[in-house]
Amino acid sequence: MPAPVPLRADYSAEELRNEARHAWTARQCARFLALAGVAEGRSRREAAKLGGMDRQTLRDWVHRFNAEGPDGLIDRQAPGPTRQLTPDQRAELAAVIRAGPDPEADRVVRWRRVDLQQVILERFGVWYHERHVSRVLHELGFSHMTARPQHVGQDPETIETFKKTSRRPSQRSSPSCPAG
């Protein structure tokens, strides 16, 4: 069995416990407590149990602590997958959306997600699921808008005639209170 990775010596077990008291998260606190167990001289199995982890995980945290100190025990945000559209392609897509569809060339009168999915595939060679197109649109600053339906036979003058108008507020004066 290989020798355990040595813990840096500039922190004592008591200093590590003090750091655990001031930890930002419970996970970071558990990591400090596990490292304090290592600094005390406990076995790696016992120290890992103190932190609620296995020995391999403790070994990984020892490496990060040795390299970065207490800041190495903070959770990091995972970078996530890389974007499939480059910033230039995203700008071009935004311009296409702002310009609107050409009814003859695009065979649509308004953009729908499924239409934009096809545009993205044809122009950039990137396939997005229809639901993901919504996310891309949101990231570009667009929101879902639908025109209010209007009947073909509506007469604008008739609509104006029947519009409700609010009453004018009454001009009543406030009742006077007798001074008492």
Image (spheres, helix red, strand yellow):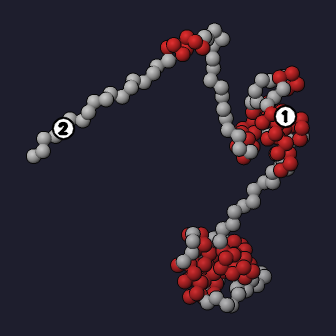
- Decide which of tag 2 and tag 1 comes sooner along the chain: 1
Instruction: Please rate how many residues cluster around mark 1, counting C-alpha atoms within 10 Å: few if below 14, some from 14 to 19, many from 20.
Output: some
Which quarter of the image is occupied by the N terminus? bottom right
Residue tagged 2: 176
Number of other residues with Cα within 10 Å of mark 2, as a class: few under 14, some 14 to 19, many 20 or more: few
Can you name the residue that lies furthest to the top here?
Answer: 153
Residue type at mark 2: give it: Ser
Find residue 162 and name its label. none
SS of the residue at dot 2? loop
Mark 2 in CB contact with mark 1 (< 8 angstroms): no
Q: Residue at x 24, y 35 (%)?
A: 174
Q: Is residue 179 left or right of residue 58?
A: left
Residue at horizontal 45%, vertical 21%?
Answer: 165
Residue situated in front as seen by the camera: 104 or 82: 104
Provide the residue designation for mark 1: 119
Asked where in the image residue 92 lies, by quadrant, the reply is: top right
Observer able to see residue 45: no
Of the residues shown, which amino acid type is indicated by label 1?
A: Val
The percent position of residue 11, horizontal first and vertical second, equals 64, 88
